[in-house]
Image: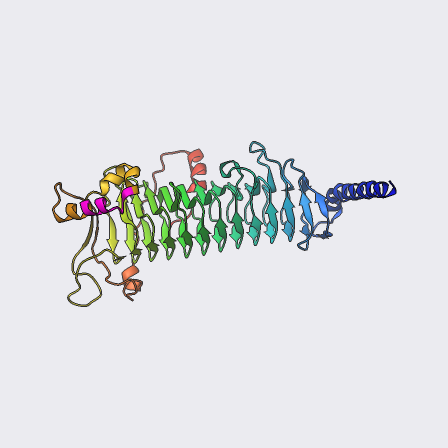
Amino acid sequence: MSQFKVLILSLTFFALSFSTFAATLQSLIDQTPEGGVLTLEDQIYEGSIVIKRTITIDGKGKATIDGGGVGSVITIKANGVILQNLNITNSGASHDKQDAGIKILKVSRVKILDNKIYETLTGVDMQESHDNEVTGNDISSLSKTHIALRGDSIRVWASHRNIFRRNKIHDSRDMMIWYSNDNLIEENEAWNNRYALHFMYTGANTVRGNKYHHNQVGIFMMYGNSYTLEDNEISQAMGSTGICIGAKEVNKLILRRNKIVYCAVGLYLDQSPFDPQYFNLMQANVIAHNSVGLRFHSTLKNNIFKGNTFLENLETVSVQANGHALNNSFEGNYWHDFEGLDRDKNGIGDSNHEIKVYLDQLWDDNLWVRFYFASPVVSLLKFLAQLAPFTEPRLLIKETKPIMKADSPILLSQENLFFEFPEYEDEDDEDDEDDEDDEEYIEGRHY
């Protein structure tokens, strides 16, 4: 009986101790002077804290801030705040209230460094905040919730010139960037998400050196301008809607030196560029081992492909809606299925490389037919259709300078990759100042 009393007293003491630590965290923050450093102990602290002055909170990798399942764990309302080496967990689960591990509201020069943010609806929610840095964090959402109902790993709303670098993002919904310009997303790794990275109505964002794998979609851009995606590796988006990189109504896009592999669709273009005066440039990318290497949603124009490698895709190019891609430029790319000759031994094919649709239309119109793609019957029918077509095949693309070998020095030479963008006309000034204010969110810089 005495042992039972000791146990009860011990549990009571622990509960009181936890309550004391929990109750004092907000007061400790409030007592920390402007510019001061608050170093936390190896304890569990109660969340729902609000930071209203410029301070640094350092958890030394041991302190945990627990939101108790209600609201946002930490809300930052002061410029220059630094949160580092913290474990942040257990936010609320309300999408309406946008519960998050860290909420950053209308501030600048905030740094979120080397934290572990887990079991929170949204990891970092940044709203109307500029010139901040989110680096070295491990971020995941609610593990027991369906992926579509989880929150975003990082959600950025109307926030410009921020840096997101070397974060590990997993088991969440999206990294979502809305109405935000001139942000740098660099050297992050993302897996087991719905969208590794999703842009809407943004301009002049740079995505560099990231590794996105085993997501439903790698990178998708919608309704924006002046994106630069370079040196990224996107792979293993293999669901029925799996896409490595997708662009819908996007102008002035540069894709450079990306590795796009093992996805249902490697590169997907839908009404991009949206404005006919603009161009998109795809340069020195590797698009390999995808079910479909390059898919156009319909007939598009002004997409420039130079120095790319199209290697062992089940279907190299697909154009939906019975369209074609002849109004785009393909020059100096390598195609594994090019069957032409190089009689003068200059490393460039003597003839154009043309991709035509024979029986391919069957599985473009009916995805169930794709199940039989490699069957003996379909292979035989496709061979016979190419040998003696009973209808005129539809020409999809024409490559004017096919490179003979994937490792040819010509492929990535400066001469082969060169493309000079035309001078763009000034946009019409038909709208009033209100429209100009709206445009500044999505226009961004020019090339």
Q: Is residue 357 visible?
A: no
Q: What residue is rendered at 13% in x and 42% in y?
A: 392
The front one of 350 and 304 is 350
Name which residue lies at 39% across and 44% down: 242
Quadrant (top left, top right, bottom left, bottom right) of the N terminus:
top right
Report the front residue among 196 and 38: 196
Whether 61 is among the magenta residues is no
150 to the left or right of 267 = right
Magenta-drawn stretch contains 376: yes
Q: How many marks?
A: 0
Question: In front here: 19 or 76?
Answer: 19
Q: Is residue 441 visible?
A: yes
Residue 177 spot, x, y in % from top left: 48, 43
On the rendered structure, is 299 left or right of 208? left
In magenta, the rendered stretch is 372-381
In the picture shown, does residue 167 fall above or below 363?
below
- What residue occupies the far bottom of the structure in this picture? 345
Residue 447's spot in the image, x, y percent?
A: 37, 52
The picture quadrant where one finds residue 105 is top right
Q: Residue furthest right?
A: 2
Q: Where on the picture, by quarter, is residue 246?
A: top left
Q: Please name the residue shown 23% across and 43% down the image.
A: 360
Where residue 414 sits: x, y (%)? 31, 63
Q: Nearer the viewer, residue 261 or 366?
A: 366
Predominant secondary structure, magenta span? helix
Answer left or right for 59 relative to 349. Answer: right
